[in-house]
Amino acid sequence: MKICVISGSPKGEESITLQYVRFIERAFPDHTFSIVHAGRDIRKMEQDREEWDRALARVRESDGVVFATPVYFMLVPGQLKRFIELAGERDAMPAFSGKYTATLTTSIHFFDHTAHAYLHGISEDFGMNHAGSYSAHMQDLKLEDCQERLILFFSDFIDAIEKKRHIQRVFLPIPQISRAYSPRDGSAAVDTGGKRVVILHDAESGSVQETMVRRLAGMYAGPVTVADIRDSMMRGGCLGCCRCAFDNTCVYNDGFREFWDAHVVPADILIMAGTIRDRYLSATWKQWNDRSFFNGHVPALEGKQVGYIVEGPLAHLPNLREVLVARATIGKAHLAGIVTNESGDPDEIDAALGALASQSVKFSEQHYRSPDTFPEVGGRKIFRDEIWGGMRAFFKADDRYFRSHGLYDFPTKNYPERIGTRLFSLFLDIPGIRKNVEKNMVANMIRPFRETIEKSKVLATRRSKLG
């Protein structure tokens, strides 16, 4: 069989993900593999139609397609995102339609599931049969059990092609929504109280996104910076070179770092506006997010209020919503809100934009950040373990941050608690004591909170007096 591998890595043949493909290729000599270096050659494909046609011919001639890519910023690299956009712009879906496809990614298992869901949905939008996904840690290929699982995974992919296995669609098609939005008369603007408001966008002239950005900017009674992310003068997408790991300095010498320092760093309230393209925002936004990796694995948005304006059917893309929310909360920012134009009702959209303006200011004045949930807690533990476990040798900037902020917190340094827990555990081995504890388990769970509850009224009174 002919297998076409669409490689999303900008590192080409030196891609870690591609080494997994080479392992599969060696293990299955009866099949032929052709590589489309979408991540490496995307600029050529944009500018040279013959280069694009050659890539598409490999897809068209194949029996199966494998998307092999690293995970960049909770999704595929911006370069592969642009390849997918080009396929839509150039009506290339027929080359993919009807083929069986699979996804192979490498990462540290940080939001690999959202990257897989994105490619799964894209495959179905292209009319393909998605036969499975394989998520590998970057170092897994050295492990024998991973090698065996990888062979089983690809064997099943070949079996699906040979037997023309029936595969049900998982993700619903993306509906078209109204592109019209005409704001009503302006209402009273929200006093920013000196808070710095920045709205970043990639809006085309005359678009709904542009109208929503302009409307929101007018709802703040104070200076608002509105900036187009394309003005950051990015020369290209993240190269995955990790040279920024030592001192947070990107290998590119373009305007991106200056743009970040001028707009993102000083913002108290940061609004990001984009338009849905396939199942994400634009490839420009993906590239912009990828390039922000020069900050490493530290919470670069800490203390900010973050909001989004999204043009498009976000309610039909829960995977995208998860990525947008995590973009804020993993960075230790508070998500002030997300506003879309889905309703098509200008009064409702105006009201939602007004609520975003007022809530973002209120929360900023209160220095409020919602409590962490599973993605934030789990994500930071992954970073902690990976950096401590080997990455700190070259991710020196991350290591310095994690040390200075006490994030290497395992095992706990609360020695009295550790000793107490151990003694209590031994205490519970005594049958009579254990029986008594089991009998009063529920009551014992809430007993420590009673004193705190008594203090709640005092705390609320104090808070009301402060503002």
Image: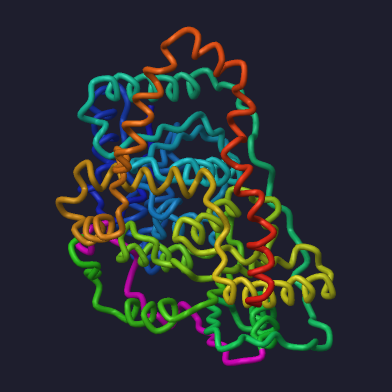
Q: Is residue 174 left or right of residue 135?
A: right
Q: Is residue 59 magenta?
A: no
Where is 278 relative to 104, above or below?
Answer: below
Residue at x 61%, y 23% (from the top left corner): 166
Q: Front-most of 366 and 169?
A: 366
Question: Which stretch is magenta?
Answer: 221-244
Q: Residue 397 location, x and y as percent?
A: 22, 62
Residue 424 falls in which quadrant of the image?
top left
Where is 431 relative to 129, above or below?
Answer: above
Residue 405 falls in which quadrant of the image?
bottom left
Outermost residue to the top: 431
Q: Residue 307 location, x and y as percent?
A: 59, 69
Q: Residue 78 location, x and y as percent?
A: 41, 60
Residue at x 40%, y 18% (from the top left corner): 427
Residue at x 42%, y 46% (from the top left corner): 379
Residue at x 64%, y 40% (from the top left corner): 171
Where is 378 relative to 169, above or below?
Answer: below
Q: Is residue 235 magenta?
A: yes
Q: Residue 325 location, x and y as percent?
A: 56, 57
Q: Front-most of 458 and 316?
A: 458
Q: Front-most of 139 and 162?
A: 139
Task: Give the colouring mode of the picture.
Answer: rainbow
Outermost residue to the left: 393
Q: Front-most of 350 and 105?
A: 350
Q: Quadrant of the N terminus?
A: top left
Q: Is residue 364 left or right of residue 55?
A: right
Q: Quadrant of the C terminus?
A: bottom right
Where is 105 relative to 302, above or below?
Answer: above
Q: Is residue 171 left or right of residue 200?
A: right
Q: How many marks do you count on the picture? A: 0
